[in-house]
Image: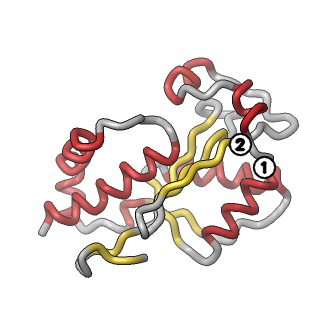
């Protein structure tokens, strides 16, 4: 992690968009916001047997199944890229249970081990920062007004909210 103004560590954050929620859902896009504040995202072409598709989820993230087959990378490519970019790091999610299971499903389909750890943002925050979370999120959303429910922008929003909560709690 790097620091902002030598005050706050900037965590790597992750967000995963999926084909739906619940049984049978799978990852369709993974986004990262790095400590240097760069972001990247990767569409994932559905693996064999990944058939579940929820039109309500598509309405939220705006990614069609056809787009995944046209533009998505294979599960092997995305899992290898994540390992290369994140090996040995801890990355943080605000939807830990969902994101962890979707990333595990990706690695399982790719056939190899995950070399980084996903943790909940709650493990980063002090009690004072937790108390400031909703206001921090509101402020960051008002400032950015950007695309929501796309993986890279959501990972960046999460990262900025963590930093803002830290500032507000000081």
**Tag 1: Cα neighbours inside 10 Å, few (<14), some, or many (≥20)?**
many
The alpha-carbon separation of the residues under discs 2 and 1 comes to 6 Å
For the residue labelled by badge 2, is the local secondary structure a helix, a strand or a loop? loop
Relative depth, front residue between 91 and 74: 74
| Residue contact at pointers 2 and 1, CB within 8 angstroms | yes
Q: Viewer-proximal residue, 62 or 93? A: 62
Q: Secondary structure at mark 1?
A: helix
Q: Name the image quarter holding the N terminus.
A: bottom left
- Is 14 drawn above or below residue 7 in the view shown? above
Name the residue: 45% across, 60% down. Answer: 120
Image quarter (top left, top right, bottom left or bottom right) of the C terminus: bottom left
Horizontally, residue 106 falls left or right of residue 130, namely right
Residue drawn at point x = 17 percent, y = 64 percent: 167
Side of 90 relative to 24 (left or right): left
Residue 58, how many percent across, how many down? 58, 24
In the displayed structure image, the side of residue 42 where residue 80 appears, left or right: right
Q: Is residue 104 left or right of residue 140?
A: right
Residue 31, image x, y percentages: 55, 50
Q: Residues within 10 Å of mark 2 (few under 14, many from 20)?
A: many
Whether residue 144 is situated above or below residue 51 in the rendered picture: below
Query: Which residue is denoted by mark 1 in the rendering?
Result: 75
Q: Quadrant of residue 166?
A: bottom left
Query: On residue 44, which mark appears?
Result: 2
Number of marks in the image? 2
Measured along the vertical axis of the image, is residue 31 above or below residue 43? below
Which numbered tag is attached to residue 103?
A: none
- Label located before the other in sequence (2 or 1): 2
Q: Nearer the viewer, residue 34 or 75?
A: 34
Residue lying furthest bottom in this view? 6
The image shows residue 16 at horizontal and vertical percentages of 56, 46
Question: Residue placed at 72% from the left, 49% from the top?
Answer: 105
């Amino acid at each position: 992690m790097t620091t902002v103004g030598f005050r706050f560590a900037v965590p790597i954050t992750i967000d995963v968009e999926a084909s739906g929620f619940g049984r049978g859902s799978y990852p369709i896009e993974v986004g990262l916001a790095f400590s240097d504040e760069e972001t990247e995202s990767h569409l994932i072409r559905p693996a064999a047997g990944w058939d579940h598709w929820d039109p309500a989820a598509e309405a939220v993230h705006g990614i069609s199944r056809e787009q995944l087959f046209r533009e998505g990378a294979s599960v092997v490519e995305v899992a290898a890229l994540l390992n290369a970019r994140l090996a040995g790091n801890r990355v943080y999610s605000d939807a830990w249970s969902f994101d962890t299971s979707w990333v595990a499903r990706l690695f399982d389909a790719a056939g190899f081990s995950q070399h980084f750890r996903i943790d909940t943002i709650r493990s980063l925050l002090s009690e004072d920062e937790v108390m400031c979370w909703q206001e921090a999120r509101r402020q960051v959303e008002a400032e950015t007004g950007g695309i929501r429910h796309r993986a890279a922008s959501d990972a960046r929003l999460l990262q900025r909210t963590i930093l803002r909560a830290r500032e507000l709690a000081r």
